[in-house]
Amino acid sequence: MSFLSKSLAIARKEALAEMRTREMVFAVLVFTLLVLVIFNFTTGVSPQVVHDIAPGLLWATFSFSGVLALNRSFVREKENGCLDGLMACPADREVIYAGKALSSLVFMLSIEIIALVIFTLLFNVNVLSLPLILITFLATIGFAAVGTLFSALSANTRAREMVLPILFLPVVLPVVISAVQASEKVLDGKSWGGLSPYLQLILAFDVVITAVSYLVFAYVIEQ
Amino acid sequence: MKGKETLKTVGLFAALALFVAALYMVFIYVPTEAQMGVVQRIFYFHVPLAWLGLLSYTLVFISSIMFLWKRNASWDNLASSAAEIGFIFTTLFLISGSLWAKPAWGVWWTWTPRLTTALILWFIYIAYLTVRFYAPEKQQGARFGAVVGIVGFVDVPIIALATTIWQSEHPGALIFEGGLAPEMKLTLMTSIAAFTVLYIFLLTLSTGLKKRENEIEELREKLE
Amino acid sequence: MPNGNPETVQTVIETRGVTKRFGNRLVLKGIDLTVRRGELAVLFGPNGAGKTTLLRILATIMNPTAGTITIDGFSAKDDAGVIRRKIGVVSHLTFLYNDLTIRENLDFYARMYDVPQRKERIQETVEMVGMGARLNDRVGTLSRGMQQRVAIARAVLHQPEILLFDEPETGLDQRIISVLWDNLRYEKGVKRTIVLTTHDLDRGLELGERFLVLSRGTVVYDNVRAQVDTSLLRQTYEQWAGVAI
């Protein structure tokens, strides 16, 4: 239980800090909305076109704003040597991983839900269906799992804002590919059955990647 | 020392011999393919490059695990060498694919599962090399690289699966090879052998070089 | 498991052959160190000598490349968690989150250290450092001196038997240390073991019971107060550090 309570303590701390400044929420949210608007004008305003490319639009947006959201995860620990403070605590290194992954997951999901609402309003495409939210949830788990690992890694490199997308985007591509296709099926009104191969793949990614990230995290964090 | 030098020379000559044989077979021995014509001969370079590009990342994966476990610099040298050479081979694979596709089908690129997976693998190689380059210290670069080596490799089968599912929904991609006549099989085998020996030779050269660089660094350290 | 009964073990901190290598740089070259229970050890050394690295290794923030660290009978390799509960760290960086209030910062660390009766303990430590009135203020709004005081409160929250101070005079105000010294030295009747690194020879000599000089990763001087010849110490330091103090 100690593992869980300490991970939650970390997640809670992250959420507190986030709500206090709101700087990240604001930046990522505005960025997300801007991307959506830009996409609208670069792909034509015809409703049919928008309907067809909606999944791609959504997931491109989520991928980029996901990178932005993940960037902040370990940067805050660098000020005042807080990472050392965390490392000196009697907790496994994996507790830090779990806490931060959880906090990133919640953060990204919040942004995504808001984006889905705005998308529905802006483009007249109903993306607020249960299957689509499920796809988003599962895919974001994968994002948070590997993104937290890579965020810790890139925070320790020069040019960290550049390194994270180079690491993150290729690795989550299978999730994005599957999420887009599954979203297409949902918007076309297909049943749950048709979603099954995609959901299975996203789930497989989540399980495998979370396990691997969890196991190697200590090597990234150690000095 | 002498033994290693001899082995290296033997390796170099073996690679050269095999390449001469392969080139002869590719350009003279094997008959021209019926459908695609002369340009199809790129196939005999294209396939070995793919095979070695993937094999190389497998090597990166294994050495990454061994390095994190044993913390022996030799494993790290192997990982970074395999990454550098694998990256080059994968780049050549992608380029040769384009050079083949354009005259054969009129397009520079097509999103087949194999090519797409290779492209993403190419990006993962870049991620590996980027992380090593941008690490503030060599020791951290080795560790970070190892992490990318492990996560990236685990991702490849998932990528292959995702692109295959994608393909089944978006048919119409071009197929690169049909059946193989015996002469073609033989040529392909020879070519694969030639490239593999070249790969091993380059790998040995690279790891040896890195080892010596490390030794120089250590000596320089001692002098300070 | 510890080798002996912790209460009777006199050596609290023991390192054998601790080496730390960063890439090809050898920062610590085989440190053998012993600190007895309740002792205040002062570690002198110029910049780059490896003091901070050694302290971070003692705090198990960092692993050594080679060598062993035994704290209160527990091995740092196998029982890091147990050791971390016994150690409080005060660095020139505060380890505090600027956007969170003092209370939130301390509550967080209290959870991470499994401090029983969190609320009461937070109140106790915060009053000890004289910051009781500002509990609900964000750390970022405090002056440097106040932040340092909160950093000290953070370090003693879990009642550690051992305190590690990294260069107090660069980060921490001398006055603060003087005022709080008794509280830092003793907690509920127990005399803490303290390791303190410093540039300031006079201050160090004033406080310490044992003196070590670290130079380029090696311990070049190690003696207890009774046997310290101040001029010899000064000389050794000058010689090895290349600077006068």
Image: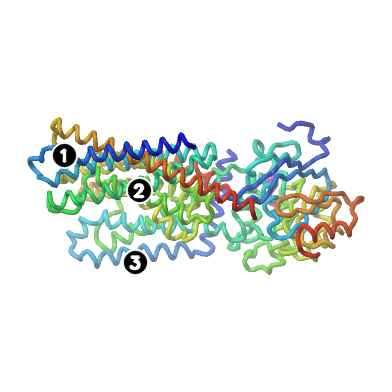
Task: Judge whether C228 appears above or below A219 on screen.
Answer: below
Q: Between A27 and B206, which is closer to the camera in this rendering?
A: B206
**Where residue C4 appears, x then y in whole percent?**
78, 31
Q: Amino acid at mark 3?
A: Leu
Up/down of B69 relative to C212, above or below = above
Residue at the limit of the structure toward the right, as seen here: C226
Label 2's element? helix
What is the distance, in whole Å, between disc 1 and disc 2 at their CAs?
24 Å
Q: Which mark is residue B87?
A: 2
Do tag 3 and tag 1 residues touch (Cβ < 8 Å)? no
Q: Are marks 1 and 2 on the same chain?
A: yes
Left or right of residue C158: residue B37: left
Per the rendered image, the range of residues in magenta is C115-120
CA gap, disc 3 and disc 1: 45 Å
Height in image: A25 above or below A201? Answer: below
Q: Is residue A147 magenta?
A: no
Looking at the rendered structure, the secondary structure element under dot 3 is helix
